[in-house]
Each structure stands twice: as C-alpha cells, then as structure tokens.
Amino acid sequence: MSSFKSLRVKIVGAALGMCMSSAAVAQEFTFSVHHFLSPKAITQTRLIEPWVAAIEEASGGRIAFEVFPSMSLGGKPSELYGQVRDGVADVVWTLPGYTPGVFPRVEVFELPNVHGGDALATNRAIQDMMPDLAADFDDIYPLLVHVHAGNALHLASGNVTELQDFEGLKIRSPSRTGAWMLEALGAEPVGMPVPALPQALAKKTVDAGLVPFEVAIPLKLADLTTASVELDGGARFGTSTFLFAMNKNSYASLPADLQAIVDEVSGRVLSEAMGAAWNEMEPLGKERARAAGATVSALSAKNTAAFDGPFQQVADRWVNEVNSISIDGAELLERAREAVAKHSK
C-alpha cells in the first residue's frame, strides 16, 4: 500500500471514529468547495475528494459537498480568499500568495532557505507552528495549510547552469516572496496564477516558470519547455503555501458533533496525506518531462552555493517587511527553519 493510500485509510478511519450513534433526526448541510485547478489535478483527486468522502461517510450523509473546480463558480483565482471570507463559497483551496500581505506569517515557509524540497517535512513543520500562524486566519476557518514539493525552474528555451544565467529572464512567480527571490537573482518576476502559465510560455510572454514537477503534468508544460532545473540535492527555489479554508459562519452552522468530524479529518492528518502525495508525484513529473525530450537537471553543489547570498537577502527582506507590522520576523524565521530541519530526513 502506498503511503498516500495508507494515509487515506487513516483519514476515513479517523472520521468514522467520530460518528455519533444517536438516532436523532439528521439535519442536512450542503457546502460548496471552490478551487482554480482542473478536476484531474492532485488537489482535487488526493486532497478534496478524499476529504469530502470521509466527511460525507462519517456524518452519515448529514454533510454533503459540491465541488467546483476550474473557477466554475466564477471569479478569478486571486478572489478565492475573498469568496470564502464573504461566504460566496463555503470552502476554498487557494494560495495565500494570491493575496499579498494578507497572510504574512505563513509566508515564512515559502522562503527558499526555509523549505528544502520535502513537502512532508515542511507540512509537519507548519502543523507544529499553527499556533504561531493563527493570527493570519482571523477571517476564515483554516482546514489545512500546506506546501508542494517546491519550485523547479521550467524554461521555454535554453537552460541555466549557474546564477548568472538568471540575469534578465522573465520568470513566472507564484507569490511576492517568489518575486523577491527572482529580483535577487537578477531575473524579472511576472506574477500570474498557474493556469495562465502554459499560454504565457507558448506566447513567449515569459521565458520560464516556477512550479513543481507535479503541477507541470496537468499543465502539460513538458510540451512547452526544453529544460527543467532544480538545485543540488533536490533543493528548490522556494515553495508555495496553500490554504484549504472554510467560511467561519458555515463552520459555525454545524453542530458540535459534525464540527468534530470536520476537524478530525483536517489539519495534521490531511497534512500528512498531502505531503506524502506530493513527494510521490514529483518523480512522475520528472519522468514525463524527460519522455517529452526536456532536459531535467540539478545545479552542481558549487553553483548551488552561489544562491546562498541572494536567498538570505530574500529572508532579510521578509523579516523587515513583517517587522514593520509588529511581527517578530527573525524569531519566526528561526523557528520555521528549526521545525523544518527537525522533520527533514
């Protein structure tokens, strides 16, 4: 049994363990789940669908969900946070990076010298530090905060082998911390939601994009790129944080026993499943790129070391940014690094 299947069993088992034996008349609740990726993406197949199934089963049908992928409820990816905050959608999956400055504490895990390339390790670190991040979620009910395996560089033409090769490249950035990193590397960041990346590469609007290998599969980036690059030892150019969240009023509308079911299959249990799933999918994404004729490579240890200075500049910039809003950035950064290191292999 794969680690993901094992964890899925745990999700369902945990939910069933919360079932009530009461024969009371069931009250029905139907909630919408909105996200911007395709229904074939890992987010829907390995996060949302198992989570929905576990809750529907454990609640005996008292809770039901309607899943709306590909922004099919309307709006733009950058509007998902506002939709769940305002009750337009009951549940959303989105990137905090799409609303810069709204989730300043969570950003610490996006920094390139915090996340090392292991989604499971960083997910566990985030769970350990959720009390430290709680102030970012005053307007919503967080179900899960997680990361993917980290950003590799996917180029429409050519390749990069050292820091100097980044100079002048237009590169899609997933967040403001990603944009800061690209600026520190001498590149020109271009902000856009990930669904827009394939067209941007095809039209040469950007020279490259920062996404993990797994995300490159549903986007079919292998057909649009000549090379994919990561750092020595599988390290990445930072990562993206993701938020799976529920409208506070929608959550509050549930009786205590149903709230307990939702909580039991969210948080740490779901974090484990997603970390394992993303780590398992990355090699498949690399294989897909190679099969399409792209070069998949890692920079040498010597050339990777040259990124230490720019990466630290990004961390320092983040610390200064959050210090200006009365967050102790240096302490949060140190604790995040320690937490990731504790869970890393």
Image (cartoon, grey):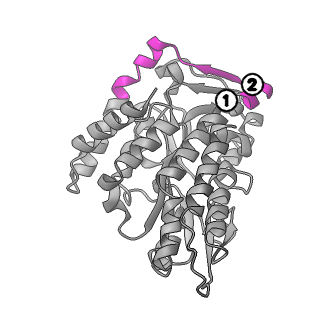
Residue 156 in picture, x, y percent from top left: 68, 33
Q: Amino acid at mark 1?
A: Pro
Query: Residue drawn 32% across and 31% down?
Result: 312
Q: Residues within 10 Å of mark 1 (few under 14, many from 20)?
A: few
Quarter holding residue 62: bottom right
The dot on residue 81 is none
In the image, is residue 295 part of the stretch drawn in magenta? yes
Mark 1 — residue?
Answer: 283
Q: Amino acid at mark 2?
A: Arg
Residue 98 is at least partly visible in this image = yes
- Seen in the image, is 73 located left or right of residue 90? right
Question: Which secondary structure, mark 2?
Answer: helix
Residue 147 in picture, x, y percent from top left: 50, 45
- Of circles 2 and 1, the one toward us is 1
Marks 2 and 1, how far apart at CA: 11 Å
| Magenta region | 287-310
Location of the N terminus by quadrant is top right
Nearer to us in this view, 8 or 84: 8
Mark 2 — residue?
Answer: 290
